[in-house]
Amino acid sequence: MAALWARLGLMLAVTLALLGSLTLALLRAQPYDAPAVRRLLTPPAGCAAPCWLGLRPGVSTLAEARRALERDPSFSYNDSFARWGRIYWTWSRPPQVIEGAIRFDRGIVREITFQVPFREVWLLLGEPDGGEYVSEATFAGAGGLSRFPVSHWSYYRRYALAVHTPAGCARFWDKVSMVRLAADDQRDSPPAAERLPDYRRRICAEVRALRARYGGMALFDW
């Protein structure tokens, strides 16, 4: 009888372990989804991109923007700079706080921007459709001038989003990006010559080579 109970106990333990492993595997297989951030990054149903909270740059009015923010208690906004064509908003649902701005001209919304860690964009939207390094810095070292990127844009055509991120190699995915929606962002974005992770690995390898060449003095904040 003792042997029978031992076998039953072993079978139960194995079953529980398998169920635990299966549950973990299923959880890992689920797509990443942060509802709050997804709502900020993707247009609501029935509103063609670019669209944010039902607001369309180039179409929606400032009054509509105020009403959209006031409908959700998680949003607050500052009207102090309205005379200069901007209102600043904050979305707060602890522990998350996201800040942004709505720029308008003659009462029409022209641009919506907000800041979010690039990892949130990457996990929710995946590989961008296009991207480019748009600014460079020059370092004068013993071997002559070297150039390296300091600013990167990622483009998501489906959502009409442009995402600006500092290009430094250190903790790139944790860097705070500026997400931009604007009426003029319907233009074709540069194609993705290679996947962003591959592109970054190549760029960062070049940066490490510069560090080695100049004794670690170059690019100290990269």
Image (cartoon, rainbow, N blue to C red):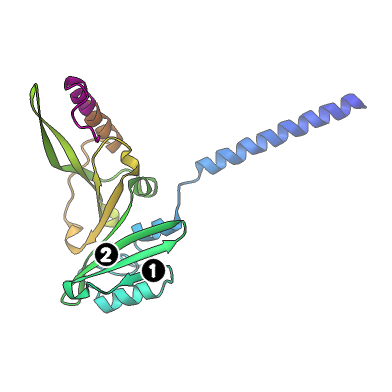
Amino acid type, mark 2:
Ala
> Is 216 in the magenta?
yes
190 sits to left or right of 72: left
Amino acid type, mark 1:
Phe
Q: Which residue is mark 2?
A: 101
Residue 23 spot, x, y in % from top left: 61, 41
Residue 113 placement: quadrant: bottom left
Residue 210 spot, x, y in % from top left: 18, 25
Q: Which residue is mark 1?
A: 75
97 sits to left or right of 106: right
Quick one: 125 or 143, which is closer to the camera?
143
Q: Is residue 60 above or below residue 40?
A: below
The disc, 2 or 1, on the residue closer to the chain's N-terminal end is 1
Quick one: 33 or 67, which is closer to the camera?
67
Q: Regarding mark 2 in the picture, which secondary structure is present there? A: strand
Q: CA distance from mark 2 to mark 1?
A: 12 Å
Can residue 42 be seen here? The reply is no
Residue 67 spot, x, y in % from top left: 34, 77
Q: Regarding mark 1 in the picture, which secondary structure is present there? A: strand
The answer to whether mark 2 and mark 1 are in CB contact below 8 A is no
In the rendered image, the quadrant that contains the N terminus is top right
